[in-house]
Image (tube, rainbow, N blue to C red):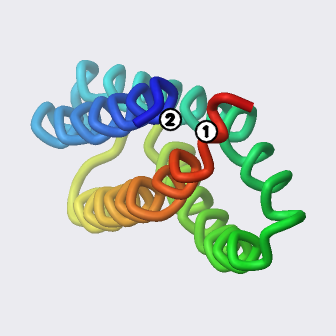
Amino acid sequence: MSTLIEELKREHRAIVGTISEVNRLGIGTKEGQNMLMSAKNSFIAHLKKEDEHIYPLLNRAAENDPELKTILDFYATNMDEISKIVYDFFEKYSYGDSGLEFSTDYGTLYTTLSMRITKEEAVIYKKFDELNLSNT
């Protein structure tokens, strides 16, 4: 496994851990709100790293690999939808809230993040390593 993929997987675990800690602390607390902003900033930095170091190389490789292009096309729309759910959650709760609606939205966020992470690690990151793109 490439160093980049190992680093991205560590970031995945840290983001999920932070979101879990927000839930434990409660979004209505100052600590929970600060932790949520930390998760938001970490998530944005993580997406930027993927956008700069993973997806351009995969897209370039897909120009000569129809199977890879199909995989990337399939996941691109799904990943965009997942990103929107995550960004919307952070936007809505950046300044605090609590109660049933937060709990429901938090459950959606946690599930959505888990799905994105699972898909990226099982398909996108795996393909990146198989193609040995970290050395190009």
Residue 128: % across, % down: 58, 49
Q: Given this view, does label 2 or label 1 mark the residue nearer the observer? A: 1
Q: Nearer the viewer, residue 49 or 104?
A: 49
Q: Is residue 40 above or below residue 35?
A: below
Residue 3: % across, % down: 46, 24
Q: Residue at x 64, y 75 (%)?
A: 71
Q: Is residue 10 above or below residue 132?
A: above
How many residues crowd around disc 1 within 10 Å: few (fewer than 14), some, or many (20 or more)?
Answer: some
Residues at marks 2 and 1 touching, judged by CB atoms closer than 8 Å: yes
| Residue ID for mark 1 | 47
Q: Secondary structure at mark 1?
A: helix
Would you say 57 lies left or right of 5 here? right
Q: Is residue 31 above or below residue 47?
A: above
Q: Residue at x 32, y 59 (%)?
A: 114
**Amino acid type of the residue tagged 1 in the rendering:** Leu
**Amino acid type of the residue tagged 2 in the rendering:** Phe
How many residues crowd around disc 2 within 10 Å: few (fewer than 14), some, or many (20 or more)?
Answer: many
Residue 62: % across, % down: 80, 63
Q: Nearer the viewer, residue 123 or 90?
A: 123
Residue at the outermost left position: 24
Q: Residue at x 22, y 27 (%)?
A: 29
Q: Which mark is residue 43?
A: 2
Residue 111: name its quadrant.
bottom left
Give the CA distance from mark 2 to mark 1.
Answer: 6 Å
Q: Secondary structure at mark 2?
A: helix
Residue 30: % across, % down: 27, 20
